[in-house]
Amino acid sequence: MQLIPPTGEDIRLVHWISRAFRDPPAKIGVAVSGGGDSMALLHLFARWSAQTGRPIAAVTVDHGLRDGSDREAAAVAKFCAEIGVPHEILLWQDWDGHGNLQAVARDARYRLMADWAQRNGVGGIVLGHTKDDGAETFVMRLSRKAGVDGLAAMDTEFERGGMRYARPLWMVTRKQLRDYLTRNDVKWVEDPSNYDVDFERVRVRKALAELEGLGLGADALQHSSIVMRQARDALEYYTAQEARRLAVAEGADLIMPQRPDVPDEIARRLRAKAIQWMGHMPYPPRLTSMQHLMEGLALEGTHTLGGAIVTLKDGQLRFMRELNAVRTTVCKTDEIWDGRWAFDGPHAADLQVRALGEGIVDCPDWRDAGLPRASLMASPAIWRGDHLVSAPLAGYSQGWAARIVADFHSSLVAH
């Protein structure tokens, strides 16, 4: 298939995708399922690549969850060969049947694509999310009583698992992309699940068609979601500012006032961000979880949430790592442990980093560290088999030092 230069309405669409990344990577990956949105994205980027000489590659993740998914992936591969775009099919085969299938599949998809990108020198991946997707997501989150963060528009550029992603079609409707495919004689497949009302998104899509007559179509909902995103970014900015003043690192722990002199929403965000960072969570805890946390602290003075232990004493909140959350976390001494700890010392192949745990009994001076026992037990230690070599935070350094390479304050970067 010959890729002709864009004309007319196609020029505007190519312009949109050309701005996918603020700092474009040398090679861009295109995630393609075979549906209309992603096929339009692929064809647009193929034309852009032909015009600019910038290399692209395409990837399809076959989850193998329904009949015909392999044929759809093969059809994408055939189309890529016709337009001269390198393409690879990735198979997801490690689902154990547990958890929310859609969420687990989404996580697997991102993981597989990131691995593929690193193998192929791809610096960023574009996704085919549209204006309609944003409107549907807004309604779905509204039905779950989401707040500012949940109702904020999807980020047009973001990072996940060390890989950059962009959504260049966020201002384009699904219909515009189908019209584009028709004009350019590009075939696509319709996922049967798009018509299955057992799926929430399909029901929302049908409801939006009815609400369009009331002025609640994709344009109106996108406007509200963008306003929410701006509000979220402002709140994140001031949360980071106040964190520098109120949140103090003490060893592996974070300490902040129970009742800081800030608006309630900023205080809530500070606590939620502290738990997210301490628990090494991809997202902050939900509002209801935070409410249960504060109730638990008021009743008992301690509460666990998201892999973190929070205590309340003398008007101060202390956030500590929970031992059970890191009991099985192991790495080499020259690797990052628990997403934040690096080590300096006499590295050796037979050494590994694990939580100190009950090894604290071999640290005679642990009390001099001034940190709670629970905090130290969840801190990193160097082991040779079952022999404790070093516990830097517990006063048993033995020539080793541990340092945080991703601290709390640096994690509070506004969107």
Image (cartoon, helix red, strand yellow):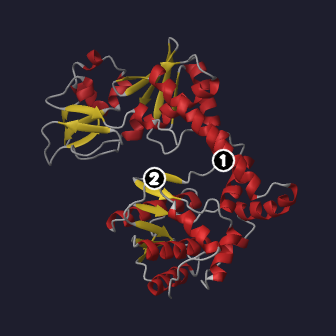
Q: Choose the circle earlier in sequence order: 1 or 2.
A: 2
Horizontal placement of 259 versus 49: left or right? Answer: right
Spot the residue most to the front: 8
Horizontal placement of 344 versus 329: left or right? Answer: left
Between the residue at mark 1 and the residue at mark 2, the CA separation in whole angstroms equals 21 Å
- Percent position (x, y) of residue 2? 50, 87
Residue at x-position 75% and y-position 67%: 197
Neighbours of disc 1 within 10 Å: few (<14), some (14-19), many (20+): some
Residue at x-position 81% and y-position 54%: 216
Could you say whether the residue bearing mark 1 is in a helix, strand or loop? helix
Spot the residue most to the right: 214
Horizontal placement of 273 versus 407: left or right? Answer: right
Q: Which residue is mark 1?
A: 226
Q: Are marks 1 and 2 in contact (CB under 8 Å)?
A: no
Location of residue 71 with respect to 93 vertically, above or below? below
Neighbours of disc 2 within 10 Å: few (<14), some (14-19), many (20+): few
Q: Which residue occupies the foreground of this view, 163 or 351?
A: 163
Location of residue 366 with respect to 136 vertically, above or below? above
- Percent position (x, y) of residue 403? 27, 32
In the rendering, which numbered label is found on residue 160?
Answer: 2
Could you say whether the residue bearing mark 2 is in a helix, strand or loop? strand
Residue 99 visible to the viewer: yes
Which residue type does callout 2 highlight? Arg
- Percent position (x, y) of residue 284? 54, 39
